[in-house]
Each structure stands twice: as structure tokens, then as C-alpha cells.
Amino acid sequence: MIMLDSYERLTNVQKATFKDIANKLLASTFLARDKKDNKDNYYFVVSYKEVFDEFFAILGYEVKLDQGVGSIMLKSDQNTGFLKLRRDETIILLILRILYHERLKETSLNENVVITVLDIHEKYNFLEIKKRINKTDLVSALRLFRRFNLIETIGDITMSNTKVVIMPTILYAINTEEITEVYNTVSRIVSEAGDEE
């Protein structure tokens, strides 16, 4: 098949690696260069991007690569494949995006944005969200975001001093140029929830 000619030129080992990474991208949407378990996969995609582009184009996806921040995203051209988050998960994701924006200013170009679980709680309080996030929901959300390569946790995520590395893939998960849009979204979600209570 001419369309996958670049795939046919791969060795058997490379084809097996391609298959594994393609399945991971379909399952998690994102790859982050600086996440330990993503690094080799990230560089494989960079090296063989043409193969990934050809393959995923057949399925209706675009492989978006941003080497500047070290992120890869699998984007559907049908606007499908979105994960529906619960209210608390959405708020936590928005808080992570806010914290990423705030802390990025404090880090050098080669550093990752590192926060703690306590920082998430403090931002939650700062935003004056009436319904408190319980530990079980927070841990569940952080595990979900880790699975999608948006964060990496260093230690026991049930502890408030545990470090959380926010990956630049968060920029794709919440695609907005203005951080005020993120704050406005949080306010809207909180006020809608207040109407329901």
C-alpha cells in the first residue's frame, strides 16, 4: 500500500515500537518529553513523524508536535474523542492550568513547573469554591491526569507535600491564550454548580 510506504521501510523492531506508541497515543492523547515514561516514545515520534502522520491521517487524526515545549498531541479532525470530566475534575484541571501559568514565570527555560498537592488546595481556597474537594476525588483526578500525561507525581499523592510536575501538555488540554479565560471558566462552573445546589 503506497499510503503507508514509510511504515513499510521500518524494521520489525521499529514497527513494534510504532505499534506500541500509536496505541499509547490513542489511549492517552498526549506525550510529554519530560515525563520519564514518555521520553523514548516522544523522541521516536519526532524521528518518525512522517509515519505517524500518514497512519493517523487515515484514522482522521493529526499529530501535533511542539518541540519547543516538548509536547505531542493526537487531535481528531472530527472534534471527537474528548474525555468528559466531572465538575471537580474540570476545576482541578483548570487549577493546574492556572498554577502552570503562574509558576512558568518563575522557572527557567529548561525546568519543569513543579507544585505540591497543597498548592492545589490553596488555589481551590483562593478561588473561593464553596464545595471543598475531598481527598478521594483529588487523588482520582490526579491519577486520571497522570494517565493522560498532563502531570507526573513524585511520591504519595495522598500527602499534601507531594510534588506534582505539570507537563506542558496542559497547554493543549486547555487551549487558551489568556489565563483570564481560565479564571472565567472556573467562575462560570462554580456559579452553575451554586445554582444546582
Image: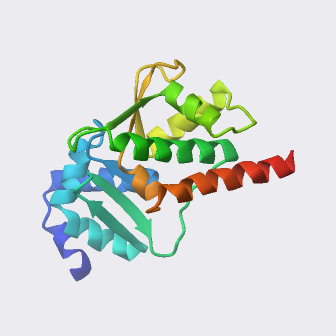
Which image quarter is the C terminus in? top right
User: Does the image show residue 115?
Assistant: yes
Q: Is residue 61 above or below residue 106?
A: below
Q: Is residue 7 above or below residue 99?
A: below
- Can you tell which quarter of the image residue 35 is in? top left
Residue at the spot 65% in from the left edge and 27% down from the top edge: 136
The outermost residue toward the bottom is: 2
Total numbered circles = 0
Residue 98 place in picture, x, y as percent: 49, 46
Residue 67 place in picture, x, y as percent: 22, 57
Whether residue 36 sits left or right of residue 6 in the image: it is: right
Q: Nearer the viewer, residue 122 or 22?
A: 122
Residue at the spot 27% in from the left edge and 65% down from the top edge: 52
Q: Is residue 36 above or below residue 154?
A: below
Whether residue 115 sits left or right of residue 50 in the image: it is: right
Whether residue 89 sits left or right of residue 21 in the image: it is: right
Q: Nearer the viewer, residue 117 or 188?
A: 188
Residue 61 place in picture, x, y as percent: 40, 70
- Can you tell which quarter of the image residue 6 is in? bottom left
User: Does the image show residue 149?
Assistant: no
Which image quarter is the N terminus in? bottom left
Which colour assignment does the render follow? rainbow
Q: Is residue 36 above or below residue 22?
A: above
Residue 13 place in picture, x, y as percent: 17, 50
Residue at the spot 28% in from the left edge and 62% down from the top edge: 65
